């Protein structure tokens, strides 16, 4: 929230999504024409991104040209998010909601008050990196499967509720001339030896068609680009670029960010 209010008129690129973006995209490594913020959050799901996008990003960040979003369709098995109920324990979020998210005007001192509010121990470090949390450990680790890979069979309707949230986000970006780059981040390549796409499923046999369905949204919305950096495990992110089975470390983040920056330069 501090970054949002402090840089809402300056940022032209933001990163949204889960910890895969939080650990995987470094705002300081884009070319000088890009002023980027990493607003991705650990343990974030698509419903949380949808809430934040509609209530905070669209109304307040008027100079956005690009959004980088982690496409975590292996986590599209829930409609829950931080903003379902947990946010009620944080007075600032409740105050925002009670004031229509300041859509009628942001108080002059809101950025300063947010800066001075109590935060967590990561706050000072995140200020220096504009929201990127880099880690140094280097290993893909094991190929743990933490969620039943076959969850789509019983939760297909929930999956497509999340798909529609992505589609709605793309459409709203299209209406505002914002390019949305969806990124499927790399996983441990040894998942190729299992029946699972990754630690949270999906079935490997189902994943390619689901990914293609997302990629095909660009046929309707040319402002959408799906950047598949996992390639079903056939990627070039080496062991020394990994933090764990589905997160990148600082070196991996450098590799991914430089690749994003190269893409942006072809769009400008």
Image (cartoon, rainbow, N blue to C red):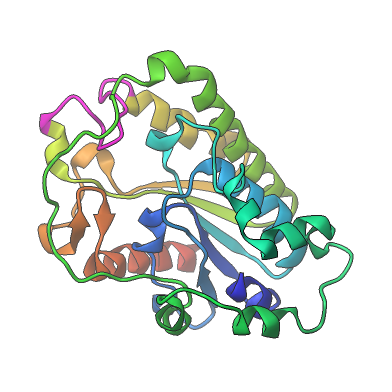
Nearest the eye: 36 or 85: 85
Q: Position of residue 27 (x, y in %)?
A: 44, 74
Residue 108 shown left or right of residue 161 in the figure: right
Q: Residue at x 29, y 30 (%)?
A: 147
Q: Residue at x 50, y 47 (%)?
A: 225
204 in the magenta segment: yes
Q: Quadrant of residue 191?
A: top left
Residue 64 shown left or right of residue 199 in the figure: right
Q: Position of residue 224 (x, y in %)?
A: 56, 46
Residue 136 shown left or right of residue 29 in the figure: left
Q: Residue at x 31, y 19 (%)?
A: 150
Which corner quadrant holds the C terminus?
Answer: bottom right
Q: Read off the magenta span.
A: 193-206
Q: Position of residue 233 (x, y in %)?
A: 20, 41
Asked if residue 10 shows in the view, the reply is: no
**Tally of marks:** 0
Nearest the eye: 53 or 94: 94
Q: Residue furthest top?
A: 153
Q: Main secondary structure of the magenta part?
A: loop
Q: Is residue 148 above or below residue 266?
A: above
Which corner quadrant holds the N terminus?
Answer: bottom right
Asked if residue 244 shows in the view, the reply is: yes
144 in the magenta segment: no
Q: Position of residue 158 (x, y in %)?
A: 53, 24
Q: Is residue 49 above or below residue 155?
A: below
Q: Residue furthest right?
A: 104
């Amino acid at each position: 929230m501090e970054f949002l209010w402090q840089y809402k008129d300056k940022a032209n690129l933001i990163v949204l999504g889960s910890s895969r973006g939080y650990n995987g995209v470094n705002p300081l490594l884009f070319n000088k024409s890009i002023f980027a913020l990493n607003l991705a959050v650990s343990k974030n799901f698509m419903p949380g991104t949808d809430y934040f996008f509609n209530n905070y990003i669209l109304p307040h960040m008027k100079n956005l040209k690009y959004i980088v979003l982690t496409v975590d369709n292996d986590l599209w098995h829930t409609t829950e998010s931080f903003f379902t109920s947990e946010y009620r324990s944080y007075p600032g979020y409740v105050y925002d909601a009670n004031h229509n998210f300041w859509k009628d005007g942001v108080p002059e001192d809101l950025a300063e008050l947010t800066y001075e509010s109590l935060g967590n121990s990561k706050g000072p470090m995140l200020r220096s990196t504009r929201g990127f949390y880099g880690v140094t450990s280097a290993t893909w680790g094991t190929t743990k499967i933490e969620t039943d890979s076959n969850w789509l069979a019983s939760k297909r309707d929930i999956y497509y509720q999340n798909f529609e949230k992505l589609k709605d986000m793309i459409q709203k970006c299209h209406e505002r001339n914002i390019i949305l780059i969806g990124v499927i981040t790399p996983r441990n390549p040894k998942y190729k030896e299992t029946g699972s796409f990754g630690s949270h499923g999906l079935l490997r046999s189902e994943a390619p068609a689901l990914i293609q369905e997302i990629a095909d949204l660009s046929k309707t919305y040319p402002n959408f680009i799906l950047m598949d950096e996992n390639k079903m495990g056939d990627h070039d992110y080496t062991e020394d670029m990994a933090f764990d089975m589905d997160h990148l470390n600082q070196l991996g983040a450098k590799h991914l960010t430089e690749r994003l920056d190269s893409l942006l330069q072809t769009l400008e």
